[in-house]
Image (cartoon, rainbow, N blue to C red):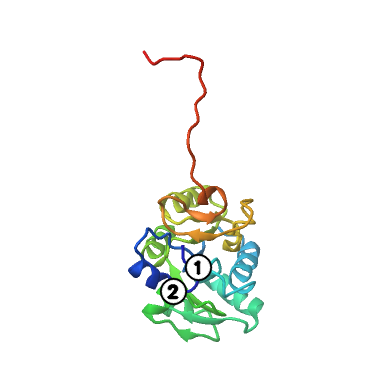
Amino acid sequence: MPRGGAGLIQAVVENATVPVIETGTGICHLYIDASADLDKAVAIAINAKTSRPSVCNAIESLLVHEAVAEAFLPRLERALNGQVEFRADTEAAKYLTDYKAARQEDFSTEFSDYILAVKVVQNASEAVAHISAHSTGHSEAIVTQDQEQADLFTQHVDSSAVYVNASTRFTDGGQFGLGCELGISTQKMHARGPMGLREMTSYKYIIKGNGQIRL
């Protein structure tokens, strides 16, 4: 179970002679829905990007519904006050004053730095499709007041941790109550998400009887 950067993990996957659990690589997304509480959205975005940008549960991409992009993006930019470099698509750039034009590869990059790729989307379905194309299956979040959109997001985003109105920075063994964390699995077999003692142990069945037989 390799812990480290993408290069180390890929080297182990390609060369290991035993099964490997891939952990750590995180291209995490935050989607701001049309019904989002913008106060919550700004606070979550700042926490998810800036509290520790080098860790795997920090967001690398921000998706914003077109209905709130004009209100949300300038507000977020003011709140960050130059702390983060925006890599904006054409639509997002309309609402930002200081940014670099996003390249396609920016949406598939784990920056591990104060850099954030930003894209404006038409709806939650487009956000989900974008995440499906670019995510590493680590952690994604939606900010919304619409339960139907929350349900759509949680049902169709296939990542190890999916959040509604909370920061992706909670994806952590200690935060999940698992004790010491050995890694965060982005796979489905056998463990997924933060891995603690339970995920690293096996079991056997001990059956004590008093003469029982199977009929």
In the rendered image, the vertical position of residue 193 relative to residue 74, given as above or below: above
Helix or strand or loop: what does disc 1 sit on? loop
Residue nearest the viewer, comparing 90 with 169: 169
Residue nearest the viewer, comparing 176 with 120: 176
Q: Residue at x 37, y 60 (%)?
A: 18
Mark 1, Cα crowd under 10 Å, few <14 / some 14-19 / many 20+, is some
Q: CA gap, disc 2 to disc 1?
A: 8 Å
Q: Is residue 19 visible?
A: yes
Residue nearest the viewer, comparing 125 with 104: 104
- The image quarter containing residue 159 is bottom left
Q: Is residue 65 visible?
A: no
User: Left or right: 148 with respect to 44?
Assistant: left
Mark 2, Cα crowd under 10 Å, few <14 / some 14-19 / many 20+, is few
Hey, what amino acid is under mark 1? Arg
Q: Position of residue 79 (x, y in %)?
A: 66, 76
Which residue is disc 1 drawn over? 3
In the rendered image, the vertical position of residue 18 relative to residue 208, given as above or below: below
Q: Position of residue 98 (x, y in %)?
A: 55, 86
Helix or strand or loop: what does disc 2 sit on? helix
Q: Residue at x 62, y 74 (%)?
A: 50
- The image quarter containing residue 158 is bottom left
Q: Earlier in the sequence, mark 2 or mark 1?
A: 1
Which residue in the rendered view is the most extreme toward the front? 211
Which residue is disc 2 drawn over? 8
Q: Residue at x 44, y 76 (%)?
A: 91
Res 214 label? none
Q: Are marks 2 and 1 in contact (CB under 8 Å)?
A: yes
Q: Position of residue 198 (x, y in %)?
A: 55, 47
Q: Position of residue 1 (x, y in %)?
A: 46, 62
Q: Residue at x 58, y 72 (%)?
A: 49
Hey, what amino acid is under mark 2? Leu
**Count of all numbered marks drawn on residues in the image:** 2
